Amino acid sequence: MESSSKEATACDGDTASGGASPTNDGSLFSEGERVLAYHGPRVYGAKVQKVELRKKEWKYFVHYLGWNKNWDEWVSTDRLLKHTEENLVKQKALEKKQGTEKGSKSGRSAQTRTRSSADTKADKDDTKTNSARGKKRKNEAGNEKENVSSEKLMKIQMPATLKKQLTDDWEYIVQMDKVVKLPRSPNVDEILTKYLEFKTKKDGMKTDSVAEILKGIRSYFDKALPVMLLYKKERRQYQEGIVDDISPSTVYGAEHLLRLFVKLPELLSYVSMEEETWSRMQQTLSDFLKFVHKNQSTFLLPTAYDSDKLADSKGKGKDD
């Protein structure tokens, strides 16, 4: 999914109107309701699992159908659409548009990619009894035999304490109206450099493949941050801090880098690579998170968060 993030994602365009009418409590959507949800530029089938009113705004905890529960997230009303024929047509139109835009580069339709992703869980359950159908799906996705299937999401092992950090990060920003103080030290660029130095010293030599993977992480971070790694209230800070072609990786730190790792499995699923390369990357990314965990007391600190000055000024004299 493209966005997050999983509000960790940016999304523009339509709101959740689509024929929606408020429930008795004023919420547009109810628990257990099947909906369509924006995630980046795409729309996915989802189910509302929880509904809460936070600071006069309805929030919905959604599960993306066919996706790992790690992608479950809280979203606002403008990220959701009613599950209607009209909106299903809109979803297909967006898929077709994405397929057209990516077709010239990757040679495969984004619409096919979205469908096969949604079917991943079912395919795994039916592997033994429907192996022929599984092979057919892979062929339809345009993957060669030696390449990783588009249905396979990379499994990056994240230590439990880092998962808790992501939860704390959400609470600091969404519930406590805080933001990460910028610039961070060490920043993302420095953390990646420290890891490369650690690996070089440990292995006794500089590994080109590791350096190339870290270069890719830096590139993904710089491009993904403004699109899918910021909460809504962090956007003003980004616009003020990232000017004159400054790279986000030299300003932001481990807090936002961890958000990228939540989204990397899906981002990398669009990249066609050989099994050996896939495995090496998966191992390197998991090892990098172990390195961050080992240095958590240096890279990730509660003191890195400060109150959002703009939110404070707006909140003065108002009753939330």
Image (cartoon, helix red, strand yellow):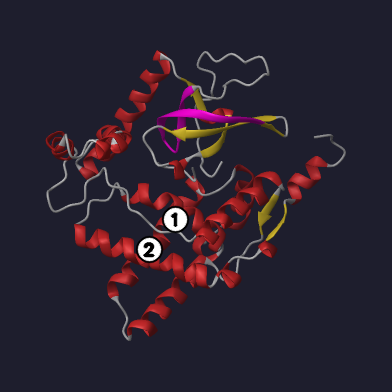
- Judge whether residue 113 can be spotted in this image: no
Q: Residue 290, image x and y in percent?
A: 45, 68
Q: Residue 202, image x and y in percent?
A: 37, 83
Distance in Å between CA atoms under marks 1 and 2: 9 Å
Identify the disc placed on residue 261: 1
| Residue drawn at point x = 32 percent, y = 48 percent | 153
Extent of the magenta region: 34-52
Vertical position of residue 187 compared to residue 156: above or below: below
Q: Residue 77, image x and y in percent?
A: 58, 28
Q: Amino acid at mark 1?
A: Phe
Chief SS of the magenta region: strand
For the residues labelled 1 and 2, say whether their Cβ atoms are less than 8 Å apart.
yes
Q: Which residue is label 2 attached to?
A: 285
Identify the disc placed on residue 136: none
| Residue drawn at point x = 38 percent, y = 63 percent | 285
Q: Is residue 179 left or right of residue 89?
A: right
Of helix, strand and loop, which one carries label 1?
A: helix
Residue 304: name its quadrant. Answer: bottom right
Q: Residue 83, image x and y in percent?
A: 44, 19
Quadrant of the snapshot with the N terminus: top left
Vertical position of residue 272 compared to residue 299: above or below: above
| Residue drawn at point x = 54 percent, y = 57 percent | 256
Residue 302: name its quadrant. Answer: bottom right
Q: Is residue 281 left or right of residue 310?
A: left
